[in-house]
Image (tube, rainbow, N blue to C red):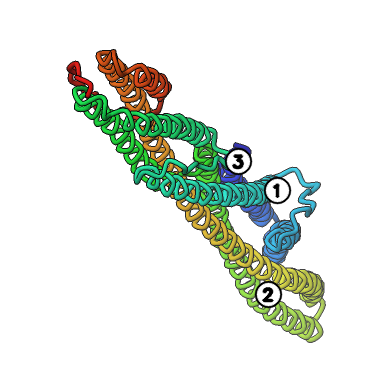
Amino acid sequence: MRLGRNSQQVSSGLPAGLGRIGQQYSLKITGFLAAIFVLTLLFAAAAARHVATGAAGTAVDRAVAGFAGLMLVLFVNLGLVAIVMGGNVSLSLQRLSRKAERIGDGEFDVDIRTPRNDEISDLYGSIRTMRDSLETTLSDLEATREEMAAERERATEAKRRAEAQNEELLETAAQFSAAMSACAAGDLSQRLDADTDDEAIRNIVDSFNDMLDELEAAVAGAQESARRIDRLSADLDGSGDDLQTGSADVVAAVDTIADGAARQTDELQEAAAEISQLSATTEEVASTTDTIAERSAAVAERAAEGSNAAAGTAERMEDTVAKTETVVETVDDLVAEADEIEAIIETIEDIVDQITVLALNANIEAARSDAGGEGFAVVADEVKALSEETMAAVDDIEATLESIQRMADRTADDIAGVDQSVRTAATDAAEVRNHLETISADIEDVDASIQQIADTADTQAQTAQELSEIVDSVADISAETTDEANSAAATADEMAAATETVAETAADLDAEAAELSNAMAAFDAETKPTPQTTAEPEPGVSD
């Protein structure tokens, strides 16, 4: 959740900070211009009052001096505004632009601090917050990538172990099938090999081998008894049919057991086919892939938030570029106004030249006249002195104007550089947004792949359930085999009862029949043939 909080700070902090900076900076510019306008008006009012209340002979001099002073105040104020707007702000923005470029190149340890305590410092804070958020985002993405790689390796190892186990189970099932088929064909000497790590398979092997041992011993005993009974059958004409019937029942029971073994073979073959699709670590893989899928979705969401934050930064940079262009236009207008003022100063110089000519003419007239010409001489001297003072003032104004023009030109150049730097920063922010979008798309692809792995694990779990049902069916068949063995033992008892009727010649046969009965009673297998009913033997007559 750390990535999400940082993304929210960037997305909410930058727009608010940049908007506040733009609003405060606009208010500051408006305040400066308003102050200049008020000071100019005050000075103009004072000059007008001076011209209106002064003596009539010096009205022109006062008007010229007042106008020159008004121009001087205007130029000084405009120069101060240009210095404040162009110099201090431009230097701070240039520094911030260079640091933003270093962040775009991957240097997240850049020191983004400023001694200022105004809207520029807020802009520094917003860029610092964006830098911290991007650094945290990249760190989280790297950690997630390493974790996903480790999980992928564990899943690959689990899959390898499951495949090896499946191959082993398939080989074991093939051996079981061959042995059971031979037993079903009558070869009771076959035995199953329990060389496997699966406990359920070992139990089946042990039970089947025990069943074959008992069945083989019982059949061998029955065969031996049958041979001895056959030697005595000549004395048992009357009981021969009953004994044959009992032997047939025994054979039927054995056939039923063989059929049960064949059914076990079919069931185990089906189990082998299902086991080939089973993974020993199905549940673990499913749980792990679900967790990775959730984390991948969270990382994709955080990358999308980082992309939105970068987009907001790019938009605010574009707004800054637009405002910088407005400032450049304002400075250009200031230069144009200075050019117009220079033209007015040239006009004043022409007027001063004419006044100088008038003063010279007055001196000439005073020299031609008599004593009354002293008045002309005084006026000429006053006009000449005023002309010289006006020229000096005009020279000062020209010097000041040239200084303001030079500062305005430098300010225009600096602001143009700042404009280019801000445009570069906006381009870098757009590139960061593209990179974040690419990372988000890659994470979505990884999430889709992990989801496919989770679906596969669920399928394997379902296969395991089907295998469990098949094993239960094999257990039921083994119970049926046990019942058929009990039925075979009952048939042997009936055969013993039939031999008791042959009292005169059946002493030996009775012993053999008892041995056969005991052998068949020990016949306990895991298949369940259909019970057979043996007819009651009739007493036989010996030859």
User: Disc 3 to disc 2, how far (Cα)?
Assistant: 56 Å
Judging depth in this view, the residue of 26 and 470 nearest the camera is 470
Q: Does 331 sit left or right of 501 as displayed? A: right
User: Between disc 3 and disc 2, whose residue precedes?
Assistant: 3
- The residue lying at 54 percent from left, 47 percent from top is 165
Can you give x and y, in whole percent of width and height, for residue 519 in the image?
42, 23
Q: Is residue 129 visible?
A: yes
User: What kind of residue is marked 2?
Assistant: Ile
Residue at image mark 3: 9
Q: Is residue 38 visible?
A: no
**In this view, the mark in front (2 or 1):** 1
Can you give x and y, in whole percent of width and height, for residue 61 in the image?
72, 66
Quadrant location, the C terminus:
top left
Q: Does 543 sit left or right of 415 as displayed? A: left
Q: Does 291 sit left or right of 497 as displayed? A: right
SS type, badge 2: helix
User: Between disc 1 and disc 3, whose residue precedes?
Assistant: 3
Q: Quadrant of residue 57?
A: bottom right
Residue at image mark 1: 128
User: What kind of residue is marked 3?
Assistant: Gln
Which label was assigned to residue 345? 2
- The residue lying at 38 percent from left, 20 percent from top is 508
Can you give x and y, in whole percent of width and height, for residue 243 in the image?
25, 26
Name of the residue lying farthest toward the front: 543
